[in-house]
Image (cartoon, rainbow, N blue to C red):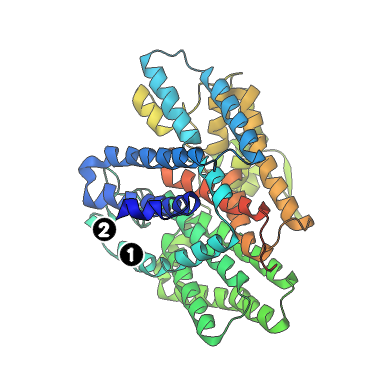
Amino acid sequence: MLLNYIKNKSPKVILKKLIILFYIYMIIEGMLRKWFIPIFNNEIYFLKDFFLIFIYFYAFKYNFLFEKKISKFFILFIILTLVFGSFGYTFNKIEVLSFLLGSRSYWLFAPIFLVIVHVFNFEDLKKFIKFNLFFIIPYYFLVILQSYYPYDTLINAGYKSMVQNPERPSAYFTYITQNTYYFLFLLACFFSYAAIQSSINIKKFIFLIFLNFLLMGVLILLKSRASYVFGSVIVIYSSYISLVASDNFSLKFKKLIIILLITPLNFNINSNIFEKEYNFSVERYNTDSFETISLVRNTSEIKVPFFNFELDVYEFCSKNSSLCRVIDEVYYIPSIKNTSKFGEGIGAGTTVVNYINKRKAFTLGESENHRILAELGYLYGNIFILMKYFIVIFLNFIFFFTNKVTNKLFYFPLLVFVSVSFMIAPITYTTSFISFICWFSFGLLITSFNKHENKTY
């Protein structure tokens, strides 16, 4: 039956199905590892590699991988990174394996965006976004159960042990941070779906309000500072784009009600329902050890304008440690002086490579940009990080200041998600789902440059 199905479908259709199946598997993987067959957690972790390699092979076979110009530039960038990333290794038996695992951390999921760009069109994306909305309901109830059940129960089990900070649910995943990015992706999907509607009747309006309520509940239950910050940015972007859109007044008004009235209202209702969780988030918002942030250590005497006052960096970060942590990730310059010319090797600071080498991780741990600099060295590491920043600047310029992209209402929430991912999120991170969802979303966003005959929203 499966063989007959494959024979009767075009390669492009089959690839679309495979990519969606892989997306679903990436969510299921965490459930398999921590709930159903944890004894095989390592084997399950690497099982997706074979699934993904098959997708790449199938795409290559039918010319859905390297036909576009972006593919050629990207492959060149991968090769340069691998060459410079090899300089830090001496290549004994352990370091050959370290190089391979480090290369895997950087590039395993990246080519998925090339396949998406080749095979997905605008109608596919609309269907996929709508498809994701129906995952919000079970997701909401799972997060509630994890929030209220004791941390040592099965539903709160994590990979090899209980999840870190058990008061924060991990949903389907083995680590809390994976759940944060999954939530932000669903939030982007919700606002994309709301923005693209050419008409909103009462039934659809109620449906959107209901989903919005569930998402605001999850936001509070996650107790994640990143979810608050980046979720707010998605709302602000969506508000602006809906305001300047060419919709008729009635449709624009309904969309703005959902964004500017329903969203804060649902947030306030949920903050009362989950008062304890909300208060916990408020208390921990600025509780980072700000003295350890490199931004503070290296620029503590610089004055920062803050409303009508001037604060030095030390004082500013003592009051806004969460914001400073984000700024510190983007402003990686102070780390250059502590980095060698060629670095310690691609992926050398990731958990998996340090496990193989039986050594301690970098002091900076999995902090994305600082870690990349230490791994690739200041000679090429700067180029790698600046290339990420250039992509973000270029995409935002194209969306804001040109008419090369149609359907901007639909793509803008994804633009926010991808911008955050490339600026600070671990796109070269060993924690697979985070890297996957970043590159996956990048592929969805890049399809906006494809030529398609669709209505402009």
Proximity of marks 2 and 1: CB atoms separated by less than 8 Å = yes
Residue positioned 45% across, 23% down in the render? 99
Farthest-out residue, bottom = 202
State the mark number for residue 155. Answer: 2
Q: Where 162 falls versus 377 (above or below)?
A: below
Q: Determine the residue positioned at 24% across, 52% down.
A: 35
Please state which amino acid type lies under the numbered disc 2.
Ile
Query: Where is residue 66 drawn, in percent x and y?
Result: 58, 38
Residue 127, x across and y down, in percent: 51, 65
Give x and y (percent) for residue 230. 57, 57
Q: In the rendered view of the protein, which quadrant contains the C terminus?
A: bottom right
Q: Secondary structure at mark 1?
A: helix
Number of other residues with Cα within 10 Å of mark 2, as a class: few under 14, some 14 to 19, many 20 or more: many
Relative depth, front residue between 362 and 90: 90
Pointer 1 residue:
142
Q: Quadrant of residue 93?
A: top left
